[in-house]
């Protein structure tokens, strides 16, 4: 069989665009001097939009390759339908948006961003490259960003990468995210993103990719994957992102039964095709753990122990900051952070009570919050997003928009689980599910997975890879 008969070359530009978008995911990189419409339309000012639009355009010009196969499964079809309905509802919300008369561009920007990410997700699910390509890309991203974040922590400031999106990081500057214990202020790493929490999200995506290499039977991949995992884990600790810590832990715990199942299947252990006698059952699910499987589980013991040691070392070195972040003290920065989140949560509930069905319009919540703060409080706060994905979607798009969004995520997860089974529990497929679950937990404490294009790629982009049909290629 020739290479041409095995590979549809129409997919090449699309797949390059998908890979480029994920490579740009951790960079808050904007055009320095851009003409209209880039100056007038906020979302178009990001460099990542070029690869995102290029991917969509290449996919459309190629004749929507892979869409037919994507729609052959009921779960995937439902995911596509609710994805499109969610974007359509966001577009129509411009008609009743809170600030539509004074600032119509707010709703237009939000609707444009929503449609761009939705089309990108469908293109990604239709024409995704083999998943084996993503692991080295995401591991490289993890290592690079761990080095950048580590340098920021070491210098306690910016390291001169402003041309690549790095923010000006000054411990004495108001607005810089720090942990404070007494008179000591400790900079949380930003990477090339606008906040440590968003930076933590990039690390989580890379950590799950590195974990798949830790399962590899190839020694060099095992070593590289383990080293990358430990480097990324240490930087995740240093972000002091409580939501990211919980999300990562939840994602890892959730996929443990699937990893055990993966190791128990002969197809996942091609180096050892000798039938193994079942010695015990995992959770009553009938997964036999033979001697070979037990040996493979024991091979994961080093990375587990090293991770535990890294956690204990972190607690020993940084326990005053961990306690401060946990809210056990009375440090002003932590108390203010908690208080601000409560304020925006209350504003979100106020918006929901006033417009429970339709919401205040896509992208309009910060403006609603700004007016609420000005007319109803004396707080020294500006309009901002509520730090909860469900409340964010509900307040802006109402119960209808929230229902469409939740159904989209649900069917995406069901399609991902179905693909895991079809791929004989391939570790890369399992890792994608772990990332999605991690961001669901993060969404309880933050908004960026749905408000920032970079966060949407981290969460929904990974979900699209999980939804992508299983191809007859190694993963």
Image: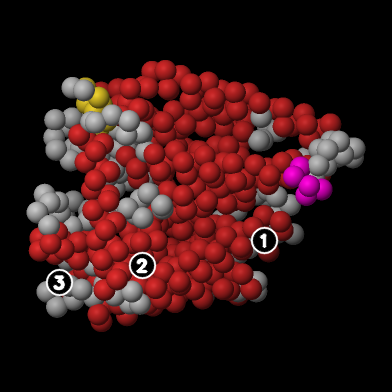
Mark whose residue sits in front, 2 or 1: 2
Question: CB under 8 Å between callouts 3 and 1?
Answer: no
Q: Spatial distance from mark 2 to mark 1, Cα to Cα?
A: 29 Å
Q: Does residue 88 sit above or below 52 in this rendering?
A: below
Q: Spatial distance from mark 2 to mark 3, Cα to Cα?
A: 21 Å
Q: Residue at x 35, y 50 (%)?
A: 446
Q: Does residue 471 sit above or below 167 in this rendering?
A: below
Horizontal and vertical percent position of residue 142: 45, 37
Residues packed near mark 3 inside 10 Å, few (<14), some (14 to 19) or many (20 plus): few
Q: Spatial distance from mark 3 to mark 1, Cα to Cα?
A: 44 Å
Reading the image, the residue beneath label 1 is: 418
Q: How many marks?
A: 3
Sequence-first disc among 3 and 1: 3
Reading the image, the residue beneath label 3 is: 103
The boundaries of the magenta stretch are 282-286
State the residue in front, 470 or 348: 348
Sequence-first disc among 2 and 1: 2
Horizontal and vertical percent position of residue 294: 78, 31
């Amino acid at each position: 069989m020739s290479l041409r008969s095995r590979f549809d070359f129409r997919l090449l530009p699309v797949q390059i665009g998908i890979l480029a978008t994920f490579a740009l995911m951790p960079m808050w990189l904007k055009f320095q001097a851009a003409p209209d419409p880039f100056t007038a339309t906020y979302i178009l000012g990001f460099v990542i939009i070029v690869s995102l639009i290029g991917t969509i355009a290449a996919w459309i010009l190629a004749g929507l390759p892979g869409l037919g196969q994507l729609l052959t499964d009921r779960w995937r079809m439902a995911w596509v339908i609710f994805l499109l309905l969610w974007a359509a509802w966001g577009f129509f919300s411009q008609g009743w948006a809170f600030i539509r008369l004074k600032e119509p561009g707010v709703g237009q920007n939000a609707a444009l961003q929503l449609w761009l990410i939705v089309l990108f997700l469908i293109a990604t699910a239709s024409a995704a490259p083999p998943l084996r390509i993503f692991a080295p890309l995401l591991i490289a991203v993890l290592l690079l960003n761990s080095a950048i974040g580590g340098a920021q922590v070491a210098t306690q400031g910016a390291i001169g990468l402003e041309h690549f999106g790095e923010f000006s990081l000054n411990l004495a500057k108001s607005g810089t995210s720090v942990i404070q214990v007494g008179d000591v202020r400790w900079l949380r790493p930003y990477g090339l993103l606008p906040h440590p929490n968003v930076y933590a999200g990039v690390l989580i995506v890379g950590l799950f990719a590195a974990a798949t290499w830790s399962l590899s039977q190839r020694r060099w991949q095992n070593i590289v994957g383990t080293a990358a995992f430990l480097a990324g884990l240490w930087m995740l600790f240093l972000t002091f992102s409580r939501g990211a810590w919980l999300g990562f832990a939840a994602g890892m715990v959730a996929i443990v039964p699937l990893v055990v199942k993966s190791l128990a299947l002969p197809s996942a252990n091609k180096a050892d095709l000798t039938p193994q006698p079942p010695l015990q059952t995992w959770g009553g699910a009938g997964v036999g753990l033979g001697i070979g499987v037990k040996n493979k589980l024991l091979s994961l013991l080093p990375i587990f122990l090293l991770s535990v040691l890294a956690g204990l070392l972190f607690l020993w070195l940084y326990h005053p900051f961990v306690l401060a972040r946990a809210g056990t003290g009375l440090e002003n920065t932590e108390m203010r952070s908690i208080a601000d989140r409560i304020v925006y949560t209350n504003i979100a509930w106020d918006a929901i009570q006033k417009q429970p069905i339709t919401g205040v319009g896509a992208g309009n919540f910060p403006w609603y919050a700004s007016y609420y703060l000005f007319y109803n409080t004396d707080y020294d706060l500006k309009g901002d997003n509520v730090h909860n994905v469900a409340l964010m979607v509900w307040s802006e798009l109402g119960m209808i928009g929230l229902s469409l969004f939740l159904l989209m995520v649900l069917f995406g997860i069901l399609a991902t689980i179905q693909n895991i089974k079809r791929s004989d529990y391939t570790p890369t497929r399992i890792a994608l599910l772990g990332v999605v679950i991690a961001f669901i937990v993060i969404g309880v404490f933050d908004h960026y997975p749905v408000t920032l294009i970079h966060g949407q790629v981290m969460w929904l982009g990974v979900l699209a890879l999980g939804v992508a049909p299983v191809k007859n290629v190694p993963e």
